[in-house]
């Protein structure tokens, strides 16, 4: 069934991009039709919210809120227009999918169905006042849910439940509304998401929000990471599959390599101990013959974001530099000749697949 109604075009374009912050985006959407008059849409042109997945709150209703709305509509009519988005099926039939106004739709539908209920309409047929946004007005599901979260903040209507708020905020996190989970430093996304929820839903439990946001941010980071972290076995497998020599002759050198380290403290000290043991064993056995003995150290960070991986790599490099400076001053030579890092960053997929190092 085809329906005719005027749609509101998106105000966003390359010259006027959508605001990055969820709340700013929601406010900008509201402003785009605040000065416009709503259309009167035939009741049959709306898609029943129960048949779609367009609602951040699902299709749960507050019966009391519906009753209150019906009483108000009987007296003064529908004060606030429903907000819908134009959609179409494969046959080109156009309909209005409700984005904001579930309870108003239910109240109006029940009033039209009640015997003896008289609601004045422009056409004399059941219709509802609505702002209809153009098809794909919201670039992504996350954009739509950011708008819905903003519109359903606690006021004189049924607000979102804590679970609904957290689930929708999780979508915003995964879609990068608060920053790229793969590149932002740990804590940046969490703080932005918690501030967003606190501002819109100030009565929600801070601990519940914090725990849920941290869990969702970590899950999103893991989904975007090149790996979910190299285990000790993963690291050994990567080394074994690599063409790099870690134990034995390599051209004019004899290479030794200690355990893979993951920090610049306990792991680093243990690896140094292994280096000393290997050097002593080589010296006693004469296994290196006349070759230069060199140490190749492999490290991983186990960090979740590109920023933190870079930070930790710098710390390990600095520790190696300090040890080599001390060794040069005391023994006249460095201890660690080369530091290689396992590929963990999002832009190191090629090195990971080819068993190379950074």
Image: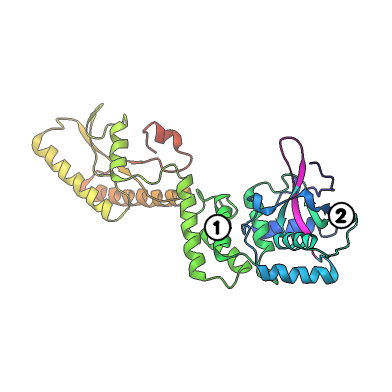
Highlighted range, magenta = 80-95
Q: Is residue 53 visible?
A: yes
Give the position of the N terminus as an image quadrant.
Answer: top right
Q: CA distance from mark 2 to mark 1?
A: 38 Å
Q: How many marks?
A: 2
Is residue 85 magenta-colored? Answer: yes
Tell me the SS state at disc 2: loop
Q: Which mark is residue 167?
A: 1
How was this image coloured?
A: rainbow
Q: Residue furthest left?
A: 284
Circle 2 is placed at which residue position?
125
At 72% from the left edge and 39% from the top edge, which residue is drawn?
89
Q: Considering only vertical position in the picture, is 109 above or below 350?
A: below
Is residue 44 magenta-colored? Answer: no
At 33% from the left edge and 49% from the top edge, which residue is drawn?
321
Q: Residues within 10 Å of mark 1 (few under 14, many from 20)?
A: some
Nearer-the-camera pick, 149 or 348: 149
Nearer-the-camera pick, 251 or 14: 14
Name the image quarter holding residue 245.
Answer: top left
Nearer-the-camera pick, 21 or 1: 1
Q: Considering only vertical position in the picture, is 300 above or below 38?
A: above
Q: Are marks 2 and 1 in contact (CB under 8 Å)?
A: no
What x and y, as percent, mark residue 233?
28, 42
The numbered mark, 2 or 1, whose residue comes first in the sequence reads: 2
Tell me the SS state at disc 1: helix
Give the position of the C terminus as an image quadrant.
Answer: top left
At 23% from the left edge and 45% from the top edge, which residue is drawn?
332
Name the image quarter holding residue 282.
Answer: top left
């Amino acid at each position: 069934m085809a329906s005719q109604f005027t749609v509101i075009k998106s105000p966003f374009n390359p010259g006027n991009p959508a605001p990055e912050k969820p709340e700013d985006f929601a406010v900008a959407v509201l402003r785009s039709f605040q000065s416009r008059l709503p259309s009167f849409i035939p009741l049959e042109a709306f898609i029943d919210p129960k048949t779609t997945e367009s609602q951040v709150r699902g299709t749960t209703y507050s019966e009391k809120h519906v009753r209150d709305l019906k009483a108000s509509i009987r007296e003064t009519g529908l004060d606030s227009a429903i907000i819908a988005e134009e959609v179409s099926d494969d046959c080109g039939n156009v309909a209005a999918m409700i984005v904001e106004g579930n309870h108003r739709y239910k109240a109006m539908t029940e009033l039209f169905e009640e015997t003896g209920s008289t609601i004045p309409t422009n056409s004399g047929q059941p219709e509802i006042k609505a702002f209809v946004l153009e098809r794909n007005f919201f670039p992504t599901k996350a954009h739509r849910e950011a708008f819905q979260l903003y519109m359903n903040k606690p006021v004189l209507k049924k607000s979102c439940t804590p679970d609904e708020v957290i689930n929708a905020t999780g979508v915003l996190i995964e879609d990068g509304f608060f920053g790229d989970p793969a590149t932002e430093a740990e804590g940046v996304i969490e703080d932005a998401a918690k501030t967003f929820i606190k501002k819109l839903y100030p009565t929600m439990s801070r601990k519940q929000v914090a725990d849920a946001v941290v869990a969702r941010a970590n899950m999103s980071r893991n989904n975007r990471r090149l790996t979910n972290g190299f285990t000790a076995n993963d690291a050994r497998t990567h080394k074994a599959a690599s063409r790099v020599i870690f134990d034995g002759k390599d051209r004019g050198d004899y290479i030794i390599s200690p355990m893979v380290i993951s920090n610049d403290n306990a792991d680093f000290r243990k690896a140094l101990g292994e280096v000393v043991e290997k050097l002593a064993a080589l010296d006693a056995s004469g296994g290196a013959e006349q070759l230069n003995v060199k140490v190749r150290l492999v490290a991983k960070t186990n960090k979740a974001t590109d920023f933190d991986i870079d930070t930790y790599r710098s710390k390990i490099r600095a520790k190696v530099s300090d040890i080599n400076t001390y060794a040069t001053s005391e023994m006249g030579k460095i201890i660690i000749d080369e530091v290689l890092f396992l590929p963990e960053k999002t832009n190191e997929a090629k090195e990971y697949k080819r068993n190379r190092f950074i």
